[in-house]
Image (cartoon, grey):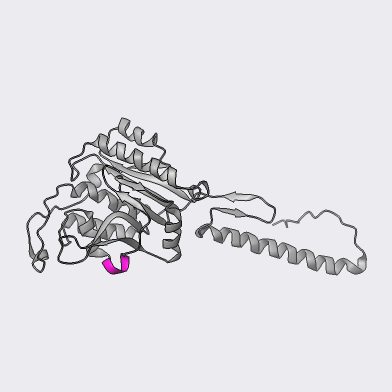
Amino acid sequence: MSERSLDIPHVGISVGASQNHLLGLKVAIFGSAILLLLFCALGSTDLHDVRLSTGAIAHRKPTRVVASSACNGMDYTNSPGSAQIERAQKLMESFDLTTSKQHRALVETVILVSNFDSNEVESFRHQGWDKVIVIPHNSLRFRTKLERDESTFWTLNEVQGRQDGLCTALKLFYWNLTEYTSITHLDTDICLKEDIVPWILRMEQDDMFFAATREREQRSYDGLNTHVMFLRPSSDIFTLLQQKSEYGEFVPFTNTEQDVLETVFSTEGSSVQMFLHEHSKSC
């Protein structure tokens, strides 16, 4: 096997200094190799643009996501699919208005959609989302539990009669997006009042695995409100959530994915201070 030689331009040095120069050259090459290894390792950090000593910028795609979901089926207000498309547009506009250009480069925007036709899917793409991911409707899993059963014998609350659990289960597919390091979900009926990227970076810095809002409402226990969520994708967690959703292995209250999530995740350990926003169909 032939040897490869490094073609180094000739420089004028005295014979007496040649050994010192050669040693310095070896140190420089070794240092460059270390820098290259460090640069490769930085692919798993928070950095988006990494400046090299040459002044060049190495670009890579953001590994964090700001996401939403839209399912063309029954929701708890019986809104048609067109209303969800309009709300997704307003959410995207709200995000653009509140996010600085510097912070926008740190995140990718993704929306999960299900049960829309091709023209409707295209309308989501025109809204400015970086990626539109279509989830087949027959992939969604949820067992609605309208009657009190053995899983609610110890509670005092009445089970809500919502029938949109299947569509809300679309959110569970965030955990299957394992190409990303973190996902921040926003319901489409949210209007942002401030830049949310600093909050996302703080969640990552604090090593949060899952975060939402603790809620009691008419429950006899503390549950979760998941109109905003921070999460770390995991295929194992996705499988667990899908199974619990499909077989109804959760304590029913809202009859949505919230019941599944608050059965799996700690309500106290997951509750965090949220960023400024309005959660309303009319915001």
Q: Quadrant of the N terminus?
A: bottom right
Residue at image x 90%, y 62%?
A: 13
In the image, is 223 to the left or to the right of 158? right
Is residue 176 rendered to the left or right of residue 258? right
Towards the viewer: 200 or 4: 200
Give the main secondary structure, helix, strand or loop, of the magenta stretch.
helix
User: Which residue is at a point 20% across and 40% down the rendered structure image?
Assistant: 73
Figure check: 145 above or below 124: below
Residue 46: percent from left, percent from top = 50, 58
- Magenta span of residues: 266-270
**Viewer-closest of 206 and 55:** 206
Quarter of the image for residue 52 reads bottom right
Q: What is the x, y in percent for residue 80? A: 21, 36
177 relative position to 282: left or right: right
Q: Is residue 194 magenta?
A: no
Numbered circles on residues, count:
0
Q: Position of residue 26 (x, y in %)?
A: 76, 65
Residue 266 in view, yes or no: no
Indicate yes or no whether the magenta region holds residue 267: yes
Observer-nearest of 15 and 55: 55
Name the residue located 24 percent from the left edge and 42 percent from the top edge. Answer: 137
Q: Quadrant of residue 180?
A: bottom left
Between 94 and 149, the one nearer to me in the picture? 94
Quarter holding the C terminus is top left
Residue 76 in view, yes or no = yes
Q: Is residue 23 above or below residue 195?
A: below
Residue 240: x and y in percent read 26, 60
Q: Is residue 231 above or below residue 97?
A: below
Identify the image quadrant of residue 95: top left
